[in-house]
Image (cartoon, grey):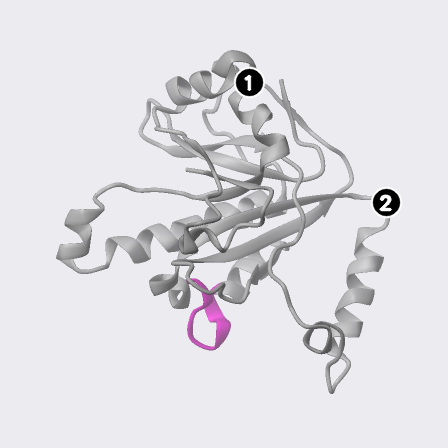
């Protein structure tokens, strides 16, 4: 059984009716992206200090749920939108926090961190029915909307690039310590997920020698 504990990821699926949905796969993870102290803690108008205070008030004793989805650098502008219109709309519609992490040297993708706080945790089993399944929290709702924007933007790219990559893909960062939740004993869980969602799901370890993997932290795995 997979539990929506503190933080999580999802695996996209397509059910028999052709409708796309999600399977929640839980993992704990921290915030991504590094910033210098003067960028992180100081703001001429005190906006950062106010934001941290608001987050603390909102958090209380609630559970934190975080997703980190990767977005190809070439379409990050579509996620943000002109003057932040798209990303702000997603924030307003879902009430989740959505942040685009600064680029990492050598990485071809940008990390988008999505999180929210929940008062009560929900449980999910791999064998549960997925038809008409609703997002389990605001962060998961925002994650689906962000992925939809990314997918639509990728479909609009040039024909030559489409030929190289004619499949829809979602990449999420997951701490390696939580990969067992996705794989399961002797690979039982990931096999069930592949069959139930009719998708190809892989868990790939970070390659420190690969500059394209610099967007992941040392303890991360890629789930795609």
Residue visible at 58% across and 61% down? Answer: 99
Residue visible at 38% across and 34% down? Answer: 20
Total number of numbered discs in the rendering = 2
* Horizontal relation, residue 50 to residue 73: left or right: right
The reply to whether the magenta stretch includes residue 34 is: no
| Quadrant into which the C terminus falls | top left
Name the residue at the front extreme.
209
Nearer the viewer's eye, disc 2 or disc 1? 1
Question: Would you name the residue on which mark 2 appears?
Answer: 61
**What's drawn in magenta, residue-wise?**
79-86
Residue visible at 55% across and 49% down? Answer: 68
Between the C-alphas of marks 2 and 1, the distance is: 30 Å
* Horizontal relation, residue 50 to residue 5: left or right: right
Q: Is residue 103 above or below residue 139?
A: below
- Asked if labels 1 and 2 touch by Cβ distance under 8 angstroms, the answer is no
Residue visible at 64% across and 51% down? Answer: 115
Question: Would you name the residue on which mark 1 appears?
Answer: 184
Secondary element under disc 1, as helix, strand or loop, is loop
Q: Is residue 16 above or below residue 102?
A: above
């Amino acid at each position: 059984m997979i539990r929506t504990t503190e933080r999580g990821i999802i695996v996209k699926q397509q059910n028999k009716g052709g409708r796309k949905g999600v399977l929640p796969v839980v993992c704990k993870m921290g915030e991504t992206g590094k910033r210098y102290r003067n960028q992180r803690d100081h703001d001429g108008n005190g906006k950062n200090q106010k934001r941290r205070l608001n987050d603390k008030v909102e958090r209380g004793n609630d559970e934190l749920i975080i997703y980190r989805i990767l977005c190809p650098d070439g379409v990050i502008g579509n996620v943000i939108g002109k003057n932040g219109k798209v990303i702000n709309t997603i924030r307003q519609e879902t009430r989740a926090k959505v942040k685009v992490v600064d680029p990492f040297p050598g990485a071809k993708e940008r990390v988008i961190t999505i999180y929210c706080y929940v008062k009560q945790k929900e449980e999910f089993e791999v064998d549960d029915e997925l038809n008409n399944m609703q997002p389990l929290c605001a962060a998961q709702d925002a994650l689906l909307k962000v992925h939809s924007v990314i997918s639509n933007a990728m479909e609009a790219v040039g024909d030559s690039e489409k030929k190289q990559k004619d499949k829809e893909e979602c990449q999420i960062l997951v701490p390696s310590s939580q990969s067992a939740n996705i794989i399961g004993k002797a690979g039982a869980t990931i096999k069930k997920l592949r069959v139930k969602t009719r998708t190809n799901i892989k868990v790939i370890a970070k390659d420190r020698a690969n500059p394209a993997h610099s967007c992941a932290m040392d303890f991360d795995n890629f789930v795609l």
